[in-house]
Image: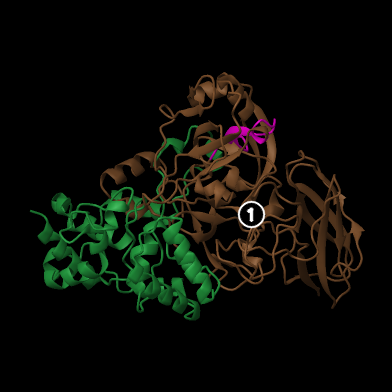
Amino acid sequence: MNEREPGIDRRQLLKGSLALGMASLLTPRVLRANDSSTVTLPFERGRRPLVAFPQKRPLMVMTTRPPQLETPFHIFNEDIFTPNDAFFVRWHLANIPREIDINTFRLTIRGRVKQSLTLGLHELQTQFEQVEIAAVCQCAGNSRGFFQPRVPGGQWGNGAMGNANWKGVRLRDLLQRAGIERDAVQVRFDGLDQPVAQATPDFRKSMSLPDALQAEMLVAHSMNGEALPLLNGFPLRLVVPGWYATYWVKMLNDIEVLNQADQNFWTSQAYRLPANPCHCVDPGDALTDTVPIGKMPVRSFITSLENGGTIPGGERCTIKGIAFDQGHGIDRVLFSVDGGQQWQSARLGKDFGDFSFRPWEAQFIPKPGHTYALQSLAINRIGESQRFGARWNPSGYLRNVVESVKIHAS
Amino acid sequence: MIPVWMFLLLLVGATGFAWGSPANGNDREQGSILNLPADPISFQPGPGNDLASRYCLMCHSAEYVYTQPPHPREHWIEIVNKMNASFGCPISDEDMTPLVDYLVTQNSLQPSPSAQHVQRDDLKETPGQSSTQSGDPQKGKTLYGRHCVTCHGPDGKGDGPIGQALVPPAANLTLLGKQSDQTILDTLRNGRPGTAMPAWKNDLNALELNHLLSFLRTLSP
């Protein structure tokens, strides 16, 4: 079916239709189960319909309201930069602005600063140095569905992550323009999304002032060379390379410098890890001390083959994958075909920067009729590697175990 | 015959509404209206499903429950307590246990939301067939008491105990006078994206929706 009818301005159609109160006709089609429009993740209740939300190709729907959409995993094999229309989506609060007027939109920087700033998009793009960085944005709960025993929360497979080229202004340039007061200790970020129930805490996140002043922290207006999709935070998103996506506040419109530790629910009570070096506990153990989640441990994935797949035996097979960490950069990726008994070095591909996905590939010749457990193990430049045994915590955070892909050679 | 403009609207809707593809450049519909889909599924029938609809659907779609693994009862108690204490869901004390009871039963049913969707679609009438005349306001009132009153209030003024806590608050149904039957039925069926108003098409069949419409008409002066 043609997406566009020649000679018809679809925007006009949309506006006209809304005026007529026919908006319900325009909602995305819900694709039915048991056809090719469903992806089933390999855990109980893992079936996800594929639905195209505004500015998105069909993605795996975890929840429609608020929108939580997972990137189908094969996308990561197609491009080292995740296309904007395939980039995962995760909102906490369903009251998302349905319209952003870029002419009246303002970002404020206030609190413990010498002079509050109120900046429009044009000022941000003309009065400050424009900086670009490739960085992975990964949901804190990415891969939660694989936790054993299972834990409550959004049941993501491995596709709640993406890699993009982000462009914008340095957070520290904004903070320095405003002038930081001497008693400042934290910076808090708020977006335009709002709770549905009045009593629900507004979604805000905070980080320490030294973290906020790191050179790589951006207020981004662009993603892979285009404006951000609305569902990924148009018009501005905080970009916190190396840190989990919970800090990457979307539709960012307020930056507040604090002179005391933030007591807001989303920082002080949510997104917490067990306060031990492993950030793990035994299933069922109570959490006593906790710390806020922060940077991402090193991970790698095989992207060119799916678990349970078949490859032709007797001929050389090239396995492709990706690796990333919190910004030290990937030093090595090891590859195993026998479930981790023996390892060979994978060849690293182009380096797009320390915070980006790093492509890698390895080769082997499978014997016909054999079954293989393919694994990859990434090591970063300070010697940290993935874990061999999965850690467990009650919120399902920080998974970085060596993953296994079983394949059969025909 | 449907008019040409309506056909084109249907066409746009059926293509998945994937506007703003990357090729469109920067001056695209970024400033336009974000039209999010309505909830595709609702809570399955069973004792307590009205509580799940009343409380859980305020803030999120039923998919959040049906994508959960089968949690033990303790997990559901934890979850419901967290929704109440941390997220401010106004669950009354007497509703806590029946709500948990319902959620625990959703573990064993292995619901098939899409199958349910298909099945219920059969009951949906085609636009244009329904009208106020075909509904019974008395039956509508009973349905209203079961499904709508906690948000929209006893007189439909949007002043139910939960309706007042919502942002935006529940709609004042006494002001529906000028809206066409079709518009009201569309909202009942599909919900109102951006608000806590859920889609009822999977819970109420065409006849029930007409009953409800007839009752809503009695609320307008």
Residue of label 1:
A290
The colour applied to the residues of chain A in this rendering is brown
Instruction: Indicate yes or no whether the magenta region holds residue B95.
Output: no
Q: Is residue A243 above or below residue A369?
A: above
Q: Quadrant of residue A48?
A: bottom right
Q: Nearer the viewer, residue B157 or A199?
A: A199
The crowding category of the residue bearing disc 1, from other C-alpha atoms within 10 Å (few below 14, some 14 to 19, many at least 20), is some
For the C terminus of chain A, give its image quadrant: bottom right
Left or right relative to B119: residue A22: left
| Residue situated in front as seen by the camera: B206 or A177 | A177
Residue furthest to the bottom in view is B108
Label 1, secondary structure: give it: strand
Q: Magenta segment: does it hold A217?
A: yes
- Taking B89 as reference, is B41 above or below it? below
A145 and A406: which one is in front?
A145
Residue A408, picture quadrant = bottom right
Residue A1, given in percent of the width and then of the height, sits at 46, 55
Q: Which residues are magenta?
A: A211-228
Q: Residue furthest left?
A: B221
Residue at x 41%, y 63% (from the top left corner): B40
* Rendered colour, chain B: green
Rendering coords of residue B22 (x, y %): 56, 41
Where A136 sits versus A118, above or below? below
Q: Is residue A32 visible?
A: no
Decide if residue A346 is in sight here. Answer: yes
**Residue visible at 48% across and 60% down in the picture:** A63
Q: Amino acid at mark 1?
A: Thr
The colour scheme applied to this rendered structure is by chain
Tell me where residue A365 appears, x and y as whole percent. Answer: 89, 66
At x 75%, y 57%, the residue is A278
Could you say where residue A3 lies in the image, as x and y percent from the top left? 46, 49
Q: Residue at x 52, y 41 (%)?
A: A250
